[in-house]
């Protein structure tokens, strides 16, 4: 079964449109990044997990995400520019999971919950019809 994530935020184009992958306008990405960082931090703390700090861009050139651990916690740096919003959100979610060193099934459950907290909804696509395999 294919699962598709779609943002339900007001800035998202109509479901199924080609623009859905880059749902956040470039001029509002900084605000969306800050909002997502707040939401993910609140959700992590609510579950008793460490909430990393978020920043952008990463200090290391040519990478999309970095993680730095320090005595007071950890920080996740994510490249926002020239990337689809869903990729940025995915890196932020994976950063929370990496900072807390979670493994399946806990990481899988948290991943789904954090996608939902950011306003993304999983939709199941119908399965293609099975071919007719009758033998003559």
Image (cartoon, rainbow, N blue to C red):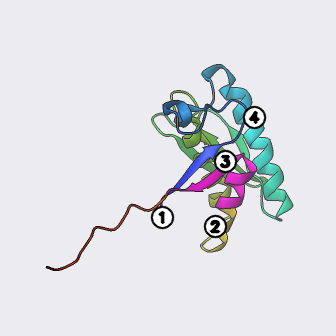
The foreground one among 59 and 112 is 112
Please rate how many residues cluster around mark 2, counting C-alpha atoms within 10 Å: few if below 14, some from 14 to 19, many from 20: some
Residue at far left of view: 136
Tag 2 near tag 1, CB within 8 Å: no
The span from disc 3 to disc 4 (Cα, nearest Å) is 17 Å
Q: Quadrant of residue 122?
A: bottom right
User: N-terminal of the two: label 3 or label 2?
Assistant: 2
For residue 114, above or below residue 39: below
Does residue 135 show up?
A: yes
Residue 72 at x, y percent in the picture: 79, 53
Depth-wise, is mark 3 or mark 4 nearer the camera? 3
Q: Residue at x 69, y 27 (%)?
A: 30
Residue 77 at x, y percent in the picture: 62, 41
- Could you tell whether 116 is left or right of 43 in the image? left
Q: Residue at x 79, y 50 (%)?
A: 41
Q: Residue at x 48, y 39 (%)?
A: 63
The foreground one among 22 and 71 is 22
The residue labelled by disc 1 is: 1
Please rate how many residues cluster around mark 4, counting C-alpha atoms within 10 Å: few if below 14, some from 14 to 19, many from 20: few
The residue labelled by disc 3 is: 120
The residue labelled by disc 2 is: 107
User: N-terminal of the two: label 2 or label 1?
Assistant: 1
For residue 103, above or below residue 26: below
The residue labelled by disc 4 is: 34
């Amino acid at each position: 079964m294919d699962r598709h994530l779609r943002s339900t935020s007001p800035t998202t184009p109509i479901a199924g449109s080609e623009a859905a992958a880059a749902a956040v306008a470039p001029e509002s990405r900084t605000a969306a990044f800050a909002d997502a960082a707040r939401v993910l931090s609140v959700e992590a703390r609510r579950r008793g997990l460490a909430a990393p700090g978020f920043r952008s861009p990463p200090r290391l050139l040519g990478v999309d995400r970095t993680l730095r651990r320090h005595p007071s916690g950890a920080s996740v740096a994510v490249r926002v520019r020239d990337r689809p919003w869903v990729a940025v959100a995915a890196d932020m979610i994976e950063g929370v999971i990496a900072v807390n060193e979670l493994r399946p099934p806990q990481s899988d459950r948290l991943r789904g919950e954090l996608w939902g907290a950011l306003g993304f909804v999983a939709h199941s696509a119908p399965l293609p019809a099975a071919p007719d395999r009758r033998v003559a």
